[in-house]
Image (cartoon, rainbow, N blue to C red):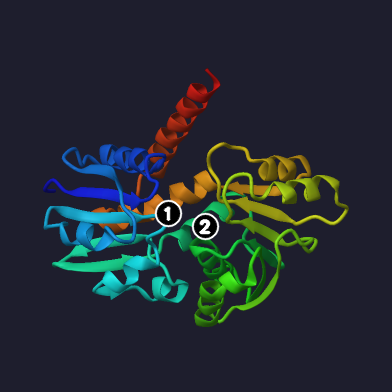
Amino acid sequence: MAARRAAVLGSPIAHSLSPVLHAAAYAALGLDDWTYTAIECDETRLPGVLAACDDGWAGLSLTMPLKRAVLALLDRTEPLAAEVGGANTVVFRGGRRHGYNTDVPGMVAALAASGVYSPPGATVVGAGATACAALAALRQMGLAAAEVQVRDHARAGDLLAAARRLGMAVELRPFGSPVRGGDLLISTVPAGAADLYAERIAGASSRPGSVLDVVYHPWPTPLARAAARSGLAVAGGFDLLLHQAARQVELMTGAERAPVAAMRAAGQAELARRAAAVSR
């Protein structure tokens, strides 16, 4: 297969683990001439970066703050990405830009790996693009409704619009409200922002049934640690990142199955390296 290029775009992007995961996949697939880099890019630069991607480009991964902004720049958007209101993947094919959302299947796969398949209910913390993907993942897992806890109801418009497109009923509640006993708790907020929920789990008689924290570094988060100590099933941001990246590899390379084991080993080694560097 001819040499191709791919990259992850976002701002900030220097911390991204995606180059490590994709490079490991290329090596395992024998795609020695393929490269994957990280490009600092915000909404204003995005049109220019996309325009500069010629026939040598296979695809792009998108992170904050580009998942919604890219939709207007695509030639074709898969139905799931349109419903969620965000694409985290662009594949260049036949001179056209195709948009996909691999966060949703990545989230479902990460939860399944922790033994969570059909929760009785769910509470999502946050209202950004990842929270919208969480609603779609919950729908795929059989739920028709979810509670969403936010700091500012006025900033939940995009999430409520996504919920309508997905056919999901959403109840907005204040950030930090008690979580219903037995719920799957999905935290989509940055590191440290969910520490209140960790304190609640440690001291409450009524706890969620399982937890997904989308943070992957540093790990474990206080929320993940409290959940594990309470005997709850815990899924983390690394597994989410791994499985969404695996689907991206399949879309960009045409591989039937991404080499998940090789990607996992490379990602874990890089996270261990970063942890060791911080502790020095």
Q: Which residue is drawn at 56% across and 51% down?
A: 214
Residue 56 x/y as whole percent: 12, 53
Q: What element carries label 2?
A: helix
Q: Nearer the viewer, residue 219 or 265?
A: 219
Name which residue type carries label 1. Gln
Q: Which of marks 1 and 2 is nearer the N terminus?
A: 2
Q: Which residue is drawn at 32% across and 52% down?
A: 9
Q: Name the residue under label 1.
A: 244
Q: Is residue 20 above or below residue 146?
A: above
Quadrant of the rendered structure where residue 221 is?
Answer: top right
Q: Is residue 31 above or below residue 97?
A: above
Is label 1 in contact with label 2 (beta carbons under 8 Å)? yes
* Disc 2 residue type (three-letter): Met
Residue 39 visible, this orientation: yes
- Looking at the rendering, which quadrant does residue 185 occupy? bottom right
Determine whether, in the image, residue 267 is placed left or right of residue 6.
right
Distance of label 1 from label 2 (alpha carbons): 7 Å
- On the image, the x and y values in percent for residue 44 come to 30, 61
Residue for badge 2 = 107
- Which numbered dot is residue 155? none
Circle 2 residues within 10 Å: few <14, some 14–19, many ≥20? many
Name the residue rendered at 40%, 75% in the picture.
Answer: 82
User: Could you classify mark 1 by the number of other residues whose Cα lies within 10 Å: few (under 14), some (14-19), or many (20 or more)?
Assistant: many
